[in-house]
Image: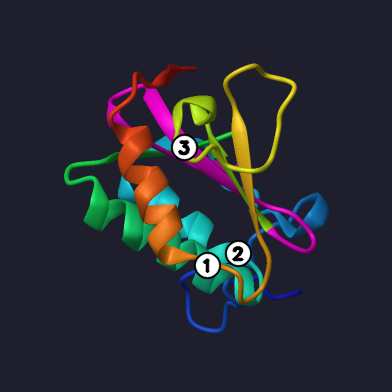
């Protein structure tokens, strides 16, 4: 009779690796709070994990009491529950930050969107400008959040 496979967490079981979607974006279950966001960041591949940690830390330092969630396999940040000012997402060669009211930021982030108010910031390896990002996060947190 064959041995029953060990479940994750039991002795001898291999920890389950997160599923990476197209471009290396982690597939993380939807959820609110710190735990799902930290699970997403921990599953980010390679150098992108450190970018995710820095973005999360900078947002937390800049916006005390920030609300967090994972929706559509991306971390979301807001001041008010259910109203979001930014999110980020892994792609093959960069991490894309979405500012939902980006056209109201000064200066306006460089990446245009098909959505009128949305602007993007693509962060490639070694290119995170923490001062610029922190300024945009601070400005964005003071604007009405996007309900979704």
What residue is at 32 percent from the left and 49 percent from the top?
Answer: 34
What residue is at 34 percent from the left and 18 percent from the top?
Answer: 144
- Asked whether residue 62 is in view, the answer is yes
Magenta stretch, overall SS: strand
> Is 71 situated left or right of 95 in this image?
left
In the rendered structure, which disc, 2 or 3, sits on the residue that comes first in sequence? 2
Task: Say which of 98 and 129 sits in front.
Answer: 129
What residue is at 28 percent from the left and 29 percent from the top?
Answer: 142
What residue is at 54 percent from the left and 26 percent from the top?
Answer: 103
State the image coordinates of residue 71 (x, y, percent, origin top left). Answer: 53, 33
Task: Say which of 65 and 4 sits in front.
Answer: 65
What range of the chain is rendered magenta?
73-94
Task: Say which of 39 and 106 sits in front.
Answer: 106
Residue at numbered disc 1: 51
Residue 106 vs 115, above or below: the answer is: below
In the rendered structure, which disc, 1 or 2, sits on the residue that comes first in sequence? 2
Q: Magenta span has 78?
A: yes
In the rendered structure, which disc, 3 or 1, sits on the residue that comes first in sequence? 1
For marks 2 and 3, give the one nearer the viewer.
3
For marks 1 and 2, give the one nearer the viewer.
1
In the picture, residue 56 is in which quadrant?
A: bottom left
Residue at numbered disc 2: 44
- Considering every residue shown, the one lying at the far front of the view is 107
Say whether marks 1 and 2 touch (CB < 8 Å).
yes
Residue at numbered disc 3: 86
> Tag 1, which secondary structure?
helix
> Is 121 situated left or right of 78 in this image?
right
State the image coordinates of residue 43 (x, y, percent, origin top left). Answer: 58, 64
Q: Distance between the Cα atoms at labels 2 and 3? A: 18 Å
- Asked whether residue 7 is in view, the answer is no
State the image coordinates of residue 44 (x, y, percent, origin top left). Answer: 60, 64
């Amino acid at each position: 009779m064959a041995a029953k496979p060990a479940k994750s967490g039991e002795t001898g079981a291999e920890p389950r690796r997160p599923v990476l979607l197209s471009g290396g974006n982690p597939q993380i279950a939807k959820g609110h709070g710190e735990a799902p966001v930290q699970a997403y960041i921990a599953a980010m591949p390679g150098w992108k994990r450190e970018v995710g940690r820095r973005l999360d830390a900078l947002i937390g330092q800049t916006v005390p009491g920030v609300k967090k969630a994972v929706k559509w396999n991306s971390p979301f940040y807001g001041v008010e529950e259910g109203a979001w000012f930014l999110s980020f997402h892994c792609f093959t060669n960069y991490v894309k930050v979405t500012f939902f009211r980006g056209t109201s930021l000064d200066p306006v982030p460089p990446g245009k969107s098909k959505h009128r108010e949305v602007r993007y910031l693509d962060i490639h390896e070694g290119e995170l400008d923490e001062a610029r990002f922190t300024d945009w996060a601070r400005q964005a947190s003071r604007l009405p959040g996007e309900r979704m």
